[in-house]
Image: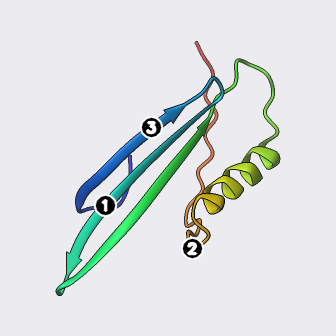
Amino acid sequence: MYSATGEIVSSQTISSKTRTVETITYKTERDGVVETRVEQKITIQSDGDPIDHDRALAEAIQEATAMNPDMTVEKIEIQQQTAQ
């Protein structure tokens, strides 16, 4: 799921009808320096209605940076799945 390695300090998942936000905090130590890394994954669901991808992406980035202005977006993945 996430690319970071280290000790998981906390994990939280918040879900609504159309959105799931997963936040995981890792702690790693390298050469005596402790680093804390927060990774957040935002999943947007649709019941078949078209999604405005540009708007959804802008909202996800805005939401992530509003939680912590020092946070940067390093990776964006877009997947489209259909129910069979």
Question: Toward the viewer: 79 or 73?
Answer: 73
Q: Which mark is residue 70?
A: 2
Q: Is residue 70 left or right of residue 30?
A: right
Q: Are marks 2 and 1 in contact (CB under 8 Å)?
A: no
Q: Residue furthest top?
A: 84
The residue shown at (34%, 69%) is 36
Which is closer to the viewer, label 2 or label 1? 2
Residue at x-position 58% and y-position 70%: 72
Horizontal relation, residue 44 to residue 29: left or right? right
**Residue receiving disc 1:** 26
Mark 3: give few (<14), some (14-19) or many (20+) Cα within 10 Å.
few
Question: If you read the primary sequence from the N terminus, does the residue marked by circle 2 or circle 1 appear first?
Answer: 1
Position of residue 71 relative to residue 21, above or below, is: below
Q: CA distance from mark 3 to mark 2?
A: 21 Å
Q: Say which quadrant the C terminus sits in.
A: top right
Residue 66 marker: none
How many residues crowd around disc 1 within 10 Å: few (fewer than 14), some, or many (20 or more)?
A: some
SS state under label 2: loop
The residue that disc 3 covers is: 13
> In the image, is 20 to the left or to the right of 9?
right
Instruction: Examine the rendered structure and indicate whether residue 17 appears above or below residue 38.
Output: above
- Dot 3 or dot 1: first in sequence order is 3
**Mark 2: few/some/many CA within 10 Å (<14, 14-19, 20+):** few
**1 in relation to 29, above or below:** above
Most foreground residue, 63 or 49: 63
Residue 16 at x, y = what percent? 60, 27
